[in-house]
Image (cartoon, rainbow, N blue to C red):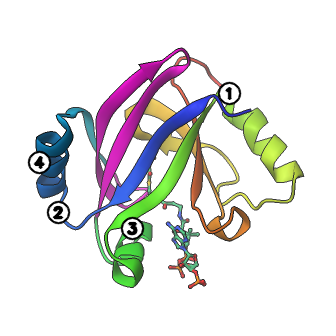
């Protein structure tokens, strides 16, 4: 079901400062910036590598406010890894497959993700404490 690690989401207080850190340390390039009101974030995607099934990225996430998923995460845990996102071929099929195992879906239907992807989150309490995201690339409609 999983094609690749699509991205690692990293929570930060200051998006521009953290982009600068990743550029200076690893030479990464920002390929997308977006404000996602529904998810309560301002985010940037930094390209890491390309594989047969698509690219992999570091996603830097700054909260739009304290009462958002990333705002609450920063308040309770501080900066660091917020979620792991896997690429899938078909988001709807992947969601159904995961739900059939008993893992709770946070999203009942796919939502808009970075770079026009379709995304769905799985509850961290059912995935060993890791907030997990499924990502379908924009080429295919679900
Ligand atoms: C919260 N918890 C986490 C966590 N966030 N555990 C692991 N990783 C995380 N990121 C844990 C808390 O520590 C707590 O555990 C329990 O979950 C409840 O947390 P809470 O702070 O009370 O918050 P809730 O229950 O209101 O919400 C948690 C939940 C939420 C994961 C359901 O954050 C959510 O819906 N997240 C999905 C959407 C999201 O994260 N969007 C931002 C990225 P204890 O043990 O203390 O009970 S958007 C994105 O990434 C898009 C743009 C994209 O990829 O394209």
Q: Are marks 3 and 1 in contact (CB under 8 Å)?
A: no
Q: Which mark is residue 142?
A: 1
Q: Residue 25: which quarter of the image?
A: top left
Element type at mark 3: helix
Helix, strand or loop at label 4? It is helix
117 shown above or below 20: above
The residue at which mark 3 appears reads as 70
Q: Is mark 3 within 8 Å of ligand 1?
A: yes
Q: For the residues marked 2 and 4, what is the alpha-carbon distance in whole angstroms?
A: 10 Å
Quadrant of the drawing holding the C terminus: top right
Secondary structure beneath label 1: loop
Q: Residue 92's quadrant in the figure?
A: top right
First-in-chain label (2 vs 4) = 2
Please tell me which of labels 2 and 1 falls first in the chain.
2
Give the magenta range.
36-63
Vertical arrangement, residue 54 with respect to residue 48, above or below: above
Instruction: Estimate the spatial distance between the alpha carbons at disc 2 and disc 1, rounded to whole Å.
Output: 34 Å
The mark nearer the N terminus, 2 or 3, is 2
Closer to the N terminus: mark 3 or mark 4? 4
């Amino acid at each position: 079901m999983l094609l690749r690690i699509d991205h690692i989401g990293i929570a930060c207080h200051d998006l521009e400062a953290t982009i600068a850190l990743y550029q200076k340390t690893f030479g990464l390039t920002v390929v997308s910036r977006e404000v996602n009101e529904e998810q309560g974030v301002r985010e940037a995607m930094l390209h890491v590598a390309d594989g047969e099934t698509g690219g992999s990225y570091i996603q830097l996430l700054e909260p739009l406010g304290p009462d958002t998923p990333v705002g609450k995460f920063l308040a309770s845990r501080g900066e660091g890894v917020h979620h792991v996102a896997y690429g899938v071929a078909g988001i709807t099929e992947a969601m159904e497959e995961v739900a059939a195992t008993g893992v709770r879906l946070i999203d009942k239907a796919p939502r808009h993700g970075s770079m026009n992807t379709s995304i769905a989150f799985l509850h961290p309490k059912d995935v060993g404490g890791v907030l997990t995201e499924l990502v379908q690339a924009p080429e295919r409609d679900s």
